[in-house]
Structures are given as C-alpha cells and as structure tokens.
Image (cartoon, rainbow, N blue to C red):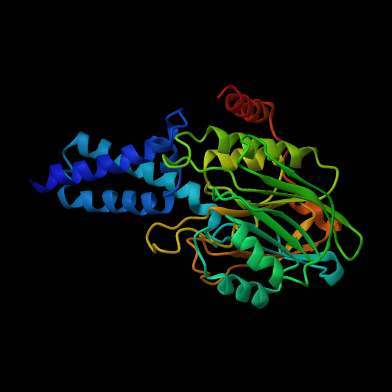
Amino acid sequence: MKLKPFLQTFGGIAVVLTLFPFVAVDYWWIRIFDYPHVQLTILTLVAFLVYFFRFDIRSWQDYAFVTIILGCFIFQLQKIYPYTPLSSYEVKENENYDQDSSISILVANVLQKNEEHEALLDEILRKDPHFIVLTETNQRWINEVSKALTNYPYKVEVPLPNTYGMAVYSKYQLINTQVKFLVDDGIPSIHGILKLPSNQKIEFHSIHPTPPMPQHNPKSTERDAEMMMVAKMAKEAKLPVFVTGDFNDVAWSQTTQLFQEVSGLLDPRIGRGFFNTFNVNSWLLRWPLDHLFVSEEFRLVEIDLGKDIHSDHFPIYAKLSFEPESSEAQKPEPPTKEELKTANEEILEAKKD
C-alpha cells in the first residue's frame, strides 16, 4: 500500500471516530465513542502531523483534508481541555477551613467478584473518610465491610447479586435516607440528608446506572434518564447538595454535561486533572467513570485517586469545605429551557421503553 492512501485512511478513521458521538441514537456501539476522547485527541493529532509527510502544496484536496483533521483535533481538545491543569478551577480552593464544616468522601466500585476485601478496608483506614459510597456490593461484600466499619454508625446497605448492589457508610448522622429504584427494579440509588458536626444539613444522592454495553444494556436510555432524574432532584434541592457514584459515563460526554447544566452542580476535577478511575487493568484505555459533583457552597480541600483495591476501578477521594459565604464566586448559570426540555425528553424516553 502506498504511503499517501494509507495516511488518508488513517486520517479518515480519526474523522469518522470524531463524528460518531454526533449520531443521535443511544445504542451502545455509538455511545461508547463518548469515552476515549483523550485517546482520540492523540490519534487525531498524529493523523494531522504525519499527513505532512506526503502533503502536496499544489493540491487543494490536501489543504481541505488537513483542515478537516485539524478541526476534528480542535473539537476533541476542547472536550478534554477543562480537565487539564491549563483550565481554571470550577470548584475553587478552600479559604476558611473549619473541621466541623468539612466532609471527606470516598467512592469505590469494589468489583463484585473481587474477594480482596482487606485492600479496600486498608484504603478506608488510610483515607479515613467521613462518608463512603460503595458500588457492586453483594451480600458477601456487605458482611465483610459492615463488620469492619464499626466506627461508621450510620449506614444504608442494599446488597444485590447483579453487580448493582450499593452501600453508604457515614460517620455523620444520616436523616430521611431512601433507597429508590428510579428506572429499573434491579438498579438502586441511595438518597438522604447528612448532618455535619456544625449542624449544617447536606442533601446527597448516590447512583450507579447501567452502562451502554451489550452485556448490560444495549442502549444508554436508562442510564441517561436516571442521571437526568437525579439532576432535577439536585436542581430542586432546598439544601446544599452533592451527587456521587459510578455513573458509567465520562465527565465530558453530552449526557454528563447536560447533567451538570440541569443540576447546577460543579465538578472539582475541572482544572485539576482527569482522575481516571477505570480501567485499572489498562494504562491505555482509562477514563473517569466515578464522579463527585457538588453545589456552589463547597470549596475543595483535596482530591485524589485511591490505591489499587483489586477492583477494575480505582477509588476516588475528595475532601470538601462548606463555605456558603463564598458561594457567589462560583455560582453556575441556571439551565436553559432547551436543556430542561432535553432532560425531560430523556426521562420520558426511558419510561416508554
């Protein structure tokens, strides 16, 4: 094969993969291309650079081709740019730290078949978070974790054998906790109110919707709908709020971006890094699937990935400072009518299915 046709094919692949997420269907084999934007950005840049080995300055087709590839690269880059240190913080650093008005959170997908319980417990001991969210917890995991976390007096446990079990453990008082099955009888979410030592009440939502994968769900409809339902809950909350869990979606996807717009919540990773939690077993194919979004009353003290707990996810840890007096400096714009309409349409689509 001659070099120029090969380079054109290589560039064409980069263009096609860039355009895939624009296809307005929610089948898994389309939505899966939301995930590897970092990899696609690198691929597109390489395609752009190597094409100059056979670039003909007299050919308008070559100018058109490299312009298209460059446009794809810019599109890819602007998707992931906010999660680089070059971008400004969305959740600003804490200014008036008060231990009684702070909360540390650890989120971990334990991988149901993983039997290395001690690795998780060691990580919890190392981080000593106030609030823990675990996903993929079956009864075995609940038994092992519950008996070890005796210093977490408040808990909500939903053991399930289908990889969608969930548990919440808290050192701080939990009030009015509820387990909801928003879109599927086998997919729980946990909701409630947490009371800080300062007596400030915080609303929380923990979710783990199904991913758009053939072995789980051939469409992203249910995942998207659950995210929009929780986004509306956060939008309507009368208290400060945080939402966390394994979203089975990346931070830069259209769905997660819409979740943020509708909920009015902020992403502490913006300006700080990707914090890729999945896949532990692949250094090449990693992306952020486990998330924490917070309302504007919170400032960030610390955010970090946890150590390997023998799951396919790294835990993610964050420490937040409650500083409502500074909230105006990072208050987001309210959602538009169009964004609310789109969220409602995604919810209705799931109900039709």
Viewer can see residue 68: no
| Residue under the point 57% across and 34% down | 222
Between 303 and 76, the residue placed more toward the observer is 303
279 over 247 or under it: above or below: below
304 over 290 or under it: above or below: below
| Residue under the point 57% across and 57% down | 87
75 on left or right of 58: right
345 on left or right of 69: right
Between 63 and 296, the residue placed more toward the observer is 296
| Residue under the point 70% across and 34% down | 335
Between 262 and 122, the residue placed more toward the observer is 122
Find the residue positioned furthest to the right: 199
| Residue 246 percent across, percent down from the top left | 58, 52
| Residue 20 percent across, percent down from the top left | 38, 36
| Residue 163 percent across, percent down from the top left | 54, 51
Number of callouts in the render?
A: 0
Residue 109 sits in quarter: bottom right
Find the residue positioned furthest to the top: 352
Viewer can see residue 26: yes
53 over 69 or under it: above or below: below
Between 267 and 28, the residue placed more toward the observer is 28
Q: The C terminus is located in which quarter? A: top right
Residue 167 sits in quarter: bottom right
| Residue 153 percent across, percent down from the top left | 81, 66
| Residue under the point 61% across and 27% down | 342
